[in-house]
């Protein structure tokens, strides 16, 4: 039985980690860390866990925690994990960090887009970017997983085969993304109030959203060259779900079958990536509550561009689910263990 | 392994049965009945089941089906099950009917409120009303379970201890209920269109909703006398969830502790009924996707009335979940088997 | 041209006052008071007013303001208006207070339910409760209008004819109310976040909501006797709209026509109160953005109770619209002036 | 007083025409055409008009209607208007067609994208594309206005200055559009049910939506060359609103100020087009219920692309509002007459 601790257990991603780990047969939660609610019953913060979780919220003590668990999930703001992580902690347990701290290899890029100094640059090389389907092998052997951002997961997975196989001109990529509001977290800002989000749609972070360099770095690895993209996220009046609509020019005229084959090559055996039937486009509700990413594409022969669509649950495959998938890989468990939830519709 | 067939598998309750049975370790679905979609892949109707359910939709053939399965769930319109059920079928397999056909013992009441002639009145006596927490023993031994309606489940369970113990004057009961829109089914009526439901709330079936006599019959059994209530359902712009707010006069001045004790007496050991902490009131989101019913109450000493609140997921405890719970009881399985889904929030 | 000032112009009710006064041919806004946004362009707080309102937000200076305007609307928290109002201000201009400060004649009741000491009890007698259809005459001559609460407006107007005419037993009244989230204001609490409200319904203020004594006082005047009610509000995932469902026992058997006649007697000539056709029940979307209150009822002969439904837009008739209606009456304008907005559907 | 008739008065766009014309001081509705509801009170179809519209629904008789009104609005399916319109009708009154029948000059394009034969190709040349801000002069003198589609209005207006002034490479334009569900009309399809739309987002009409050639034709006129674009609409869980996010490559490095100046040149004096302040991006809620289009842009210097955002109410500027604006122009009224509704927030 893997003993897990969660720092930041009372955010939305933290709560989802709890939901998923509770149904995981080989893991148990030993620490519900939440600085804001210390000593409060965890279920009082999230009453869905009433009579299910008897534990109290604990302080965010990474050192103490590392001595009693096998793995720590840090579902914390940027800068938290990197400012506390050290070799002593890493000698005690594994770390799966849901923040951006270890996602980018270049600290300059991190510091520019996030506006914070990186406190443990020495650990960056060791960290593995936890996009499971792509980096499975390296994840297996690392002590630090940088759990990918929600948008990067959906964008990168849906474009990866096209980029890797050189089907598209990588410098024409434009990703227009739409997210449910849980992606904005549980902090109390006017912008996240029901009346401001409901019956409304807006773009935000236009040209400067922090997930841009993360996507670019991953696509660059796949392309073997520098990739620069346009990325625009939008806030949608729903709780969960991300849909990415990506556009790119095809390098040459290409048929449906050729592209389909490329997707099959990479994803045929991937349990969590479903390439939908021809002319069926992903909808966020079809993956709600599950760790699936649904993907499909359409070629526009008039413009010789391809439109690529990806949908997933931002709190599952986009955060807590992928974190558990990473844990499974790191500990040699069945990769789908605790993650076979059937999507809930409607 | 229990072999299950579903008639009406492409309605919302049918889809939820599929979701729940897929995660049930002792049951497997052998028949996805759907007259409207015969020979179509089931996942094409509900793409959340893509790469999960490979089966095609089958005709609604109850006879043929009864020979190959152990239990049939009929998630069909009123009148369907009662018009086809016969002793031959019942000698082959057990029936869990999600319609109203076998819920009321008095065919006159059924025929008056539903406006259809009952086609198999001889089977009514044998049928057991499948409100699991109340009728567990009889369910164990029957071949026909009448799976309770969504509103009656929430209303009856939340009021039961008060009625059974004579705490309230049963002829003062008023239940004001609120339901998500999946309760209206997947039929294409103008009233169920997104733009008609969204940003709107309305009452419907005022004084004449069909669940009224069903609730009254069950409360009458508990009270040992005839109970007549006021019941008003409302349509709420959300997919899932029922909240019932019931009002009744206390027979005499009663303290919080006395009432609490009554609830503990009946529900302390019930896994699926959670009596919340004092001053915490049920919210539908806290039970979403799960088989829980959350219950609480508050005494208004100014009026000597009690306000009783109940919340559940109308598609789970209000339909498919309770149906699976009934199956578990009928086949001697662990009652919670396949039903321990943690509620999903947000 | 009436010169109006608004204190609290950046709350939701304040914003709605601005929307309504902008289309009022006989009024102009001279002061957008908002302590939190002093010197900021008003349209930067609410971009719907971009290129429409060029003014900046001003401080909440009641004294100074009273010298330059004819009427002040205070859309402020409880306690604000009563702590600053004085005869000097009242000699300069009229006051329409959207808070609860002057709604109840008994300061003890106010202080008990609101938990604050009343700072100007001497002005309470002069204040008139601005339920326009009921108190039109007194409103005409007062300097202080206590603009009614949202729930009390809908509840009282829908029950008034029955209470006034002695049709119902007033001590059996139970009101189950449902409100959109704008009623909770624009303050940043976790409970008001999109993800907490969306796909959810809950009761709050069970047995102790502050609008209870306000409704009771008004119904008591109508009844000529003390009225005590049960009142339970619920939070619904929509921006605007209140629906009240009230239940009461009929004093004697009464026909539809008799009750209908009572409603016609009081409301036939009321522009803003629409008694719907038989068997058509109010929906909040049908009054959205307008000053209408839609009302209807159904008699349940089985229980000899009547179910009374009322729907209105909580920000219009429940706040800003009724405030403008009061202004119209106080200044001798056409009562419907600036308030003939056709409801917006969908 | 202009006498107006509406064919298709019971669709969502028809209902919005009624709402707007009711508040128009120089127009009155003489005919509520609705084949499906002949002889039914109009308010029974849309209860928001209860006690406001006393008229009954009439048959869709274009000939008869043309003799009693000055203008006919056809808010009907494609093919209706073109199959009935003739010179006799046009000698009696003016036509504002909200369908696509007269939007494209090339019948081949129409027939290919809409899959119907055009029945009155001879009238196409006379028809003017009613994008008011661009074609004001020609609208003034025509008898037939082809009222633009919702997506084309928002897309074209937001891109027009850039295309007209040659700022962007027109063959790099990609428009990713998001619409509320009222755009799908009031027809009863499973896809439009509340439970299918709520908590969901999806793309549809990928690469082949019918508004594509309409946008391309208008942008081609502006560019003075053939323009081919990528256009992908998405369905968003809200009633009203369209947001378009367009991407294009700048022909050369361009500063914010240069682009801003171009927008000012075209739109500074346009009442209904609001170019927002720098770094403020359009939100659909800010224009809800109004005839405004909010526009803004951001240059991405990393990719030398520009991101252009437009937001409007699909039922107002995207349908009924622009139709009334066209009427105003055709009849020499103040262009903003009856259209100065302040947007409703929240």
Image: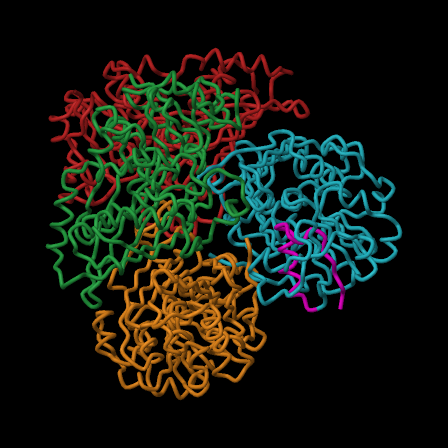
Chain colours: A orange, B cyan, C red, D green
Q: Is residue B3 magenta?
A: yes
Relative image position of residue D156 (x, y in whole percent): 27, 47
**Residue at 64% from the left image edge and 22% from the top image edge:** C304
Instruction: Please indicate whether residue B272 sits to the left or right of residue C114 in the image.
Output: right
Q: Residue furthest front?
A: D122
Q: Is residue A205 magenta?
A: no
Instruction: In the rendered view, tell whether residue D39 sits above or below residue B318.
Output: above
Along the viewing direction, whichever of C324 and A265 lies nearer the viewer:
A265
Instruction: In the rendered view, tell whether residue B145 sits above or below residue A50.
Output: above
Please state the extent of the stretch shown in magenta in the rendering.
Answer: B1-25
Along the viewing direction, whichever of B201 and A228 lies nearer the viewer:
A228
Instruction: In the rendered view, tell whether residue B139 sits above or below residue D22.
Output: below
Instruction: Please indicate whether residue C6 sits to the left or right of residue C197 in the image.
Output: left
**Residue at 27% from the left image edge and 61% from the top image edge:** D172
**Residue at 47% from the left image edge and 58% from the top image edge:** A284
Along the viewing direction, whichever of D335 and B89 lies nearer the viewer:
D335
Q: Is residue C22 visible?
A: no
Relative image position of residue A135 (x, y in whole percent): 42, 81
Relative image position of residue D250 (x, y in whole percent): 19, 61
Relative image position of residue A336 (x, y in whole percent): 55, 75
Answer with the quarter of the image where residue B330 lies: bottom right
Instruction: In the rendered view, tell whether residue C341 sits above or below residue B83.
Output: above
């Amino acid at each position: 039985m893997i003993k897990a601790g969660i720092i930041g257990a009372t955010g939305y991603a933290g709560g989802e980690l709890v939901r998923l780990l509770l149904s995981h047969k080989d893991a148990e939660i030993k620490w519900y860390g939440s600085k804001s609610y210390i000593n409060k019953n965890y279920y009082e913060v999230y009453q869905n866990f009433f009579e299910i979780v008897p534990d109290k919220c604990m302080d965010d003590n990474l050192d103490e925690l590392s001595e009693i668990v096998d793995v720590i999930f840090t579902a914390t703001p940027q800068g938290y994990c990197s400012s506390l992580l050290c070799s002593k902690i890493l000698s005690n347990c594994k770390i799966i960090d849901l923040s951006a701290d270890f996602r980018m290899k270049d600290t300059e890029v991190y510091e520019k887009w996030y506006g914070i100094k990186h406190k443990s640059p020495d650990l960056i090389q060791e960290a593995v970017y936890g996009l499971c389907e792509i980096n499975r092998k390296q994840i297996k052997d690392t002590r630090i997983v940088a759990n990918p951002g929600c948008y990067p997961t959906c964008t990168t997975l849906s474009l990866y085969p096209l980029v890797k196989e050189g089907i598209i001109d990588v410098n024409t990529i434009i990703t227009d993304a739409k997210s449910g509001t849980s992606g904005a977290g549980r902090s109390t800002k006017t912008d996240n109030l029901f009346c401001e989000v409901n019956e409304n749609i807006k773009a935000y972070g236009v040209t400067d959203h922090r997930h841009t360099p993360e996507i670019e770095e991953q696509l660059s690895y796949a392309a073997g060259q520098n990739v620069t993209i346009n990325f625009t996220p939008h806030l949608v009046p729903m709780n969960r779900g991300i849909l990415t609509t990506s556009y790119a020019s095809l390098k040459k005229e290409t048929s449906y079958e050729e592209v389909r084959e490329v997707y099959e090559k990479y994803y045929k055996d991937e349990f969590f990536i479903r390439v939908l039937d021809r002319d069926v486009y992903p909808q966020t509700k079809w993956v709600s509550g599950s760790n699936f990413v649904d993907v499909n594409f359409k070629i526009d022969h008039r413009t010789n561009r391809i439109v690529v669509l990806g949908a997933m649950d931002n709190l599952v495959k986009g955060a807590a689910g992928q974190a558990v998938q990473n844990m499974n890989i790191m500990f040699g468990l069945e990769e789908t263990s605790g993650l076979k939830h059937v999507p809930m519709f409607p």
